[in-house]
Every structure is written in structure tokens, then in C-alpha cells.
Amino acid sequence: MNKLNAKTRATEVDALSDALVRLYKADAGVADDAFLKTVMEDVDLLSAHLTTAIKQDKVPGSLMDADSARVERAAAGAQGESASSLKKLLVGVINDKLVPYLSAMALANASVYSRFAAKAEEEISRANETVARRGK
């Protein structure tokens, strides 16, 4: 199972993490796994924070919006982390916890984990292909 390319954009990592959480919740077979549950809760939480950070980074359309957005962004910046730092954390959880665990468990207990692992690998490959196409 390939790891997620670190050059993936924050919005792409956010979309991928949403897809991984959705796949996890749809697969009742893996729901009893305590370690996977903890990892997916981390992915879900970081994804929610990343979504918020991305929305705060959007450039507003008018000058009036720009002034209010600067105030909001300054306040939010003091409270939360940037989208790029959250992206790095999320990529780390996916690459260092989720991918190795799913790779091992798909071998150890294929009847339970292979479907979820294959779908997760498909989503990660799709994100990596997007990065590869952008590089050309």
C-alpha cells in the first residue's frame, strides 16, 4: 500500500481524509478494531480542523469582506493552526499509522480488512495521481 505524497495540497488531503472516514464508517467489519478506531478518530478530528483552517484562508471578494476577514483570521490564527501545519499532521497520521496498519492487517486478516484497505489504497492512489499530473 503506497503512502500519500507529501506534496498533496491541503484541500486534496482534506477531501481524501473525508473519503477515508466515510469508507471507514461504511465498513462494519472494521468497526471493532480499537486501534483503527483511534486512528480514524484522529483523521476525522484533524480533517475537521483542516476544513476550518482552509475556510479561514479563503480570500474574500470585496474590500469590506477583506477587513472583517483580516480581523477574523487574526483571531482564528491566535487560536488555531494553519492549514499547512494541519495538513502535515494529517499526512503523518495517514502515512505513519493508517497505511502501515492497514497493510499489515490486510495480510493478517484479509476477510475483515482487505476491502477497506483496498478502497483506502484506491483513494490514496487517486490523490497521488493528481499530484503527479500537476507536476507534468
Image (tube, grey):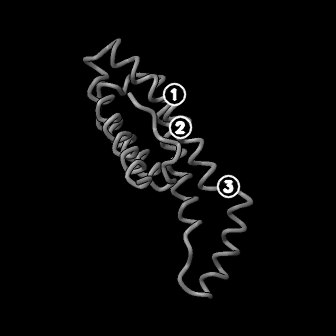
Q: Residue at x 48, y 49 (%)?
A: 8
Query: How far across and down, in percent of the image, does residue 13 sit?
Result: 47, 48
Measured as percent of width and height from the top left, residue 100 is found at 46, 23
**Res 42 label:** 2
Identified by mark 3, the residue type is Gly
- Whether residue 25 is situated above or below residue 7 in the rendered picture: above
Instruction: Name the kind of residue labelled 2 in the image.
Output: Asp
Other residues around mark 3 within 10 Å, as few (<14) / some (14–19) / many (≥20): some
Residue behind mark 3: 80
Question: Is there CB contact under 8 Å for labels 1 and 3?
Answer: no
Mark 1 belongs to which amino acid? Lys
* SS category of the residue bearing label 1: helix
Identify the residue at image location x=54%, y=53%: 50
User: How packed is label 1: few (under 14 Cα within 10 Å), some, or many (20 or more)?
Assistant: some
Q: Give the quarter of the image for residue 52.
A: bottom right
For the residue labelled by badge 3, is the local secondary structure a helix, a strand or a loop? Answer: loop
